[in-house]
Amino acid sequence: MYRRCGFRYEKKLRGTGVARIAGIDEAGRGALAGPVVAAAVVLPEKFRHRRLNDSKQLAPELREEIHSDLVSNPEVRWTVGAVDSVEIDRINILRASHRAMRLAITALIDPPDHVLIDGLPVIPFPLPQTAIIDGDCISLSIAAASVIAKVTRDRMMRDFCAQFPQYCFHQHKGYGTELHLLKLHEFGPCPIHRRSFEPVAQPLLALEEVVQVRSSSARRSRREVGVSLSQA
């Protein structure tokens, strides 16, 4: 069922007397390299943007444009927090994601009264929170945070690509694509790889799984085409 991204949760909170509401989201949790980055965003009550949505549903060019709109708006308050691969390996990715969120929210000069978080509750957390599954598709505050977190992390990964060009980070941003796994097998991990992640230690095994999934999808597509032709 399609759910329009809007201010439903924000309006409900304001109806109870909550004035200042932040949205928070992270980017890079599932990557094999680089930091996990979280953004916290406080939008003005009458904020409007026709194209703002979950960052994963936006083309990169549009995502950059919306990011520019958000960070250049003097009424939008935003901050980011990042946890690097060394810390991710030390404390695990879930705790690192939560830490990045706490870093982002505590960096806001004027703390919000309540925080809307994409996904599950963050514990511990310094402020009252409401966790929303698929919140980046439902809440404009969370969607704004998802865009800022994603664009910030993508830019960081492009910078890392200049340091480690052999891995092509500008193309896959550290995620476990076929290209990335091939480069991992060829060159081994670099300093920003998350060594606690199994595909980093065993890229060939992960690559075989990617190829199997792709082959299975291709066979299924051919079968579906065959059924459609036979029914025609």
Image (tube, grey):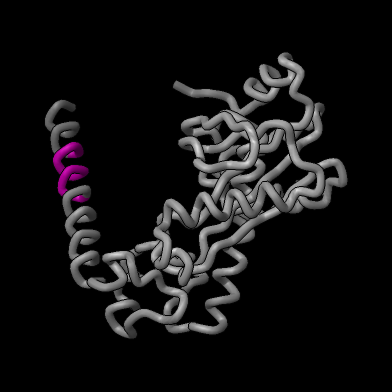
Residue 59 location, x and y as percent?
57, 50
Along the horizontal axis of the image, is 51 left or right of 44?
left
Report the residue at 77% width, 51% height from top. Answer: 71
Along the horizontal axis of the image, is 175 left or right of 66?
left
Q: Does the magenta stretch include residue 121?
A: no
Instruction: Assign the N terminus to one quadrant of the image.
Output: top left
Picture quadrant where residue 140 is located: top right
Q: Does the magenta stretch mainly form a helix, a strand or a loop?
A: helix
Of residue 149 and residue 113, the one placed in the foreground of this image is: 113
Instruction: Assign the C terminus to one quadrant of the image.
Output: top left
Report the residue at 66% width, 52% height from top. Answer: 104
**44 above or below 33?**
above
Q: Does the magenta stretch include residue 220?
A: yes
Residue 223 location, x and y as percent?
14, 40
Residue 113 location, x and y as percent?
73, 32
Report the residue at 65% width, 37% height from top. Answer: 127
Report if residue 177 is visible in the image: yes
Q: Over which residues does the magenta segment extend? A: 218-225
Residue 189 location, x and y as percent?
36, 79
Q: How many marks?
A: 0
Of residue 127 and residue 105, the one placed in the foreground of this image is: 127
Residue at the extreme top of the image, as rendered: 15
Report the residue at 18% width, 65% height from top. Answer: 208
Report if residue 62 is visible in the image: no
**213 above or below 158?**
above
Picture quadrant where residue 181 is located: bottom left
Residue at the extreme right of the image, as rendered: 74
**82 above or below 144?**
below
